[in-house]
Image (spheres, grey):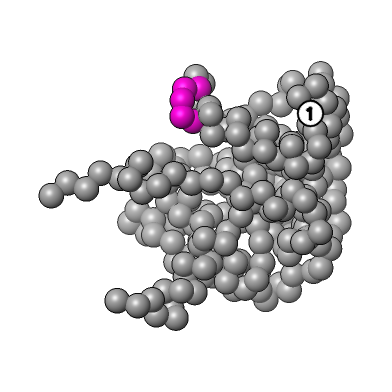
Amino acid sequence: MPDNPQQQAVDAAITSRRSIRAFLPTPVARADIEAILQVASRAPSGTNTQPWQVYVLTGESKAQLSEAILAAYADPEQAARHTEEYQYYPREWVSPFIDRRRKVGWDLYALLGLTRDNKAGMAAQHGRNYRFFDAPVGLIFTIDRVMEQGSWLDYGMFLQNIMVAARGRGLDTCPQAAFTQFHRIIAEQLQLPSNEMVVCGMALGFADPEKIENTLITERDSVASFARFVD
């Protein structure tokens, strides 16, 4: 059966999604942000619990959060006192996961001309996370601490919906686990209630087509490598 326009549009929104690491300063209309979040809220969640909470940062509020985090990040002793509340990555890396992780890192650094001995350059690039890669909109996501693993799975579907809905509107994103290290600073800056835990951040805006880091397209394994059809 030939592809229909609806299928093509959905597939294009999904497959064109990439983690963008350099944005234009072009503002994003509040109406568009609200529409994206409204669409994303149709994500499924166990017994319709809808465990997501979103803080939308622009202008001065985004700048203040970025500066507060970067001040801590720039001081190794202070940064070491900030640790994640939950374990995002495995405690012990094994193949093929460690191989994929290394490849995407070195592919990005190669595009930016960063060699393995340029630790300062790598640190500076990582620090760009905390400016939301200069995107005009920064999103911080939280979840109530009473929620368990199933709700975190639901949350992933909500985040994906945001990224796909953004692509449908010609916008780009970068989901950012880097923010979790500085959850205490985020809680203070945003005056989060004590029951809320930071899940991640996300940059939202228009990709800068002139920046070489935005040419990075990560590889995906074939369906044959991860799917087993059982008749």
Residue depicted at 35% across the width and 41% down the height = 225
Q: Residue at x 85, y 48 (%)?
A: 64
Q: Is residue 208 above or below residue 105?
A: below
User: What residue is pinned by disc 1?
Assistant: 115
The residue under the point 71% across, 26% down is 82
Kind of residue indicated by mark 1: Thr
Task: Name the image quarter holding the N terminus.
Answer: bottom left
- Answer left or right for 140 relative to 92: right
Question: Does residue 133 lie above or below 26 as drawn?
Answer: above
| Residue 9 within the magenta-colored segment of the rendering | no
Q: Is residue 95 magenta?
A: yes
Q: Secondary structure at mark 1?
A: loop
Residue bounds of the magenta highlight? 93-97
Q: Is residue 87 at all visible to an observer of this figure?
A: no
From the viewer's side, name the closer residue of 91 and 37.
Answer: 91
Q: Nearer the viewer, residue 41 or 229?
A: 229
**In the image, farthest residue toward the bottom:** 5
Q: Horizontal placement of 115 versus 19: left or right?
A: right
Give coordinates of residue 21: x percent, y percent.
73, 50
Dividing the picture into quadrants, the one containing residue 32 is: bottom right
Residue 177, quarter of the rendered image: top right
| Residue 33 in the image, given as x and y percentages of width and height | 65, 69
Residue 35 x, y percent position in the rendering: 59, 73
